[in-house]
Amino acid sequence: MSAVSAPTIPHPAAAAAGAAESPDAPFTVGGRAFRSRLMVGTGKYASNEQMVRAIEASGAEVVTVAVRRVNLDRTREEGILYHLDPTRWFLLANTAGCYTADEAVRYARLGREAGFNDFVKLEVIADQETLLPDPAGTIEATRVLAAEGFVVMAYTNDDLITALRLEDAGAAAVMPLAAPIGSGLGLVNPYAVRTIKHRLAVPVVVDAGLGTASDAALAMEQGVDAVLLNTALSSAREPARMALAMRHAVEAGRLAYLAGRMPKREVAIASSPTSGLLG
Amino acid sequence: MTRTVVHDESRASADGPRGAPPVTVVVNGELRTLAAGTTLADLLRAHDLDPRLVVVERNRTILRDRSAYSTLTLEEGDALELVHFVGGG
């Protein structure tokens, strides 16, 4: 049988396929470009192996870590760098657990000294029960850290005015919550997040409160640049599978945003022709 | 709580003044008694800590130059924080 294949005649529909797809720009913050718009935390996994599998499945490039005292009576494997290759993932140190601007600045400086980058996920918490952020403390710490050359990614509530002040203070990205940290309640105020995205020039990342894939898609559909989540993966029954779901959801939400959704209507409009019906 | 770090005495007597009284320092919030002349490098080694994976703050100042750890002698009353990265969101 001849190896030469019959000349193929392109199907008329084939030429049109793909024409509408233009590649999305990378997510850029602090001069660094990332392909993935999903960032993930490393806390609260049942095991380090489970964590690594989930991070791999998520496709995330940016992973957050916390700065804590070395336990001097520890086993050697406690530090996360024994499990997470810092050349494979971009480590974003956070200031979780800080309740004042001064504390957060101290933690940020320690995190930078670990030697990976100048980025910090700034958190200044105001309330132990809700873990809601302290706007004044976050703005103050942003100003100090930005002046020291940090790329500040500031965790904040979904208040537009606070977001604007953070941008003025030098934040490289503003990260409004979807809902309280670890709550899994999803995006409780899409309008607020959409408004922040409309008004800010710096990237907007929805951070905290997402519970499942549809939450992540809904967040991305508001036009935000990325999402950051942790508990949604670490507390899922199967973290790696949820990580894959989140990866698809973030991509789907981004595509839907870029595509531009149809307007909502209160009445039906037929999808099939109303002419040409049989007599 | 006071603890005595397991320490290489031969090294201490080589580095520090012979017969000098031990020094008490605070490491990560705990009082520790160290032989006189103990360096920061000695302390990290005693706890099996890799200096590249630990950041050290001494009396609220970050010690940026890791090559100086072996010549930095800990002094009475020093407050040290030894931190590293752990899992977090």
Image: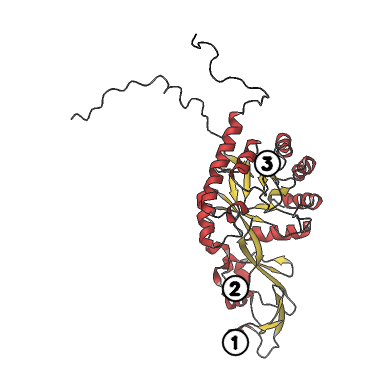
Relative depth, front residue between A56 and A209: A209
Which quarter of the rendered picture does the N terminus of chain A lie within? top left
Name which residue lies at 58% across and 29% down. Answer: A259
Q: Chain of mark 1?
A: B
Q: Residues within 10 Å of mark 1 (few under 14, many from 20)?
A: few
Q: Is residue A256 above or below residue B14?
A: above
- Residue marked by disc 3: A204
Q: Secondary structure at mark 2?
A: loop
- Residue marked by disc 2: A74
Relative depth, front residue between A252 and A102: A252
Q: Residues within 10 Å of mark 2 (few under 14, many from 20)?
A: few
Type of the residue with mark 3 = Val
Q: Secondary structure at mark 1?
A: helix
Relative depth, front residue between A171 and A13: A13
- Residue marked by disc 1: B9
Name which residue lies at 67% across and 45% down. Answer: A186
Q: Secondary structure at mark 3?
A: loop
